[in-house]
Amino acid sequence: MTPSVDAGGLVEVKAVSKRFPVRRSWKETVLHPRSTSYQEALHDVSISVRKGEFFGLLGKNGAGKTTLFKILATLVLPDSGTARVDGIDVAEDPMAVRRRLVPVIPYERSLYWRLNAEENLKLYASLQGFSGVEARKRVDHVLDVVDLGDTGTKQVGLFSSGMKQRLLVARALLSDPAVLLLDEPTRSLDPVSARNLRVFLRDRINREQGCTILLATHDAEEVRELCPRVGILENGRLVVNGRTDDLFEAVADNRYRLVARGRVKAALRQLGSVAYLEVDGLPEARDGEGWEHVRLHIPGGRAAAARFVRELTGLGIEVALLSPREVPLAEFIETLSADPIPAAQSSSVVAGCA
């Protein structure tokens, strides 16, 4: 499937390519002073993100996610192609772009740890040209948005990692941007803090504030939880761009994990599903409470899975869980890179605003 671009996006990237010179040793420089080799970071990437969307960029380290973000943030110029934010070309008017798009730098050391949250934000507000009543209003507003208004005189150095990340988001919101760039925002957080930050970003920043968010990550579950649409980058190329759930379901290939209790094996035979039954190592794996753990292949997508559960429960089987197979990131990217969605499914996967 060829990645497609939506017309009228708030963020428009069209056929962007970027390469960087490869660092050479002193010996190579002396022996071949005029020779230069390059590493391609992005190749012909096209993405469109609509206003109010929470869009994910998924890829392994070195896939090109950060380079694309640097181009959008006007920190790096593309070698070819165009990137526009709210209709403004990043190369032609970078100052106007910076008033509309702000990257959230995920490094806590960029905060002043001996100052409290309010003092940090007042400092950055002044650097952005705000002062007096206007600065105070903006600082109070963003502190309220990120739920840090009650931290008082507590120094930022004493904040939890999750609080520091929220303060970084508050700093980015000072200029009331239309677009936020989030580059692996949960990378340094523990699982609970990461979960809380994801909920905060989705509910408070994207839904309540209406801020358009581009999220770059190598965490497939993070994208699945937050982003209705996702673009997959592999070696600088956009290998696929579509609805997140459709892509994961296509890679999972209608394979499910069933947790049920009762005469499960007999029920599966009666339903005629034994031909699709896949079991991990044993005919049936059973835990201490009598729940059977079975891997199934149920052709037909969600409708077939729902019908299967109804029929199974109708036979007196207790069903605790029927969930799609979890797909590791490496397998997800490799599968889509090698075979970007079978033709029969591609119509439901073509990029579009969810």
Image: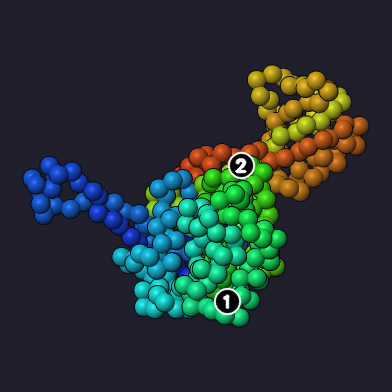
- Of callouts 2 and 1, the N-terminal one: 1
On screen, 122 above or below 315?
below
Q: Residue drawn 41% across and 62% down?
A: 70
Percent of width and height locating residue 54: 60, 62
Percent of width and height locating residue 101: 50, 70
The answer to whether residue 129 of the structure is visible from this angle is yes
Q: Kindly identify the amino acid type of the residue bearing the numbered disc 1.
A: Ala
Q: Could you give the CA–CA distance between mark 2 and mark 1, rounded to whole angstroms?
A: 33 Å
Residue 296 position by quadrant: top right
Q: Secondary structure at mark 1?
A: helix
Between 144 and 324, the one nearer to me in the picture: 144
Q: Secondary structure at mark 2?
A: loop
- Label 2: which residue? 190
Left or right of residue 171: residue 322: right
- Label 1: which residue? 135
Residue 318 position by quadrant: top right
Q: Kindly identify the amino acid type of the residue bearing the numbered disc 2.
A: Asp
Q: Residue drawn 68% across and 25% down?
A: 279
- The answer to whether the residue labelled 2 contacts the one labelled 1, judged by CB atoms less than 8 Å apart, is no
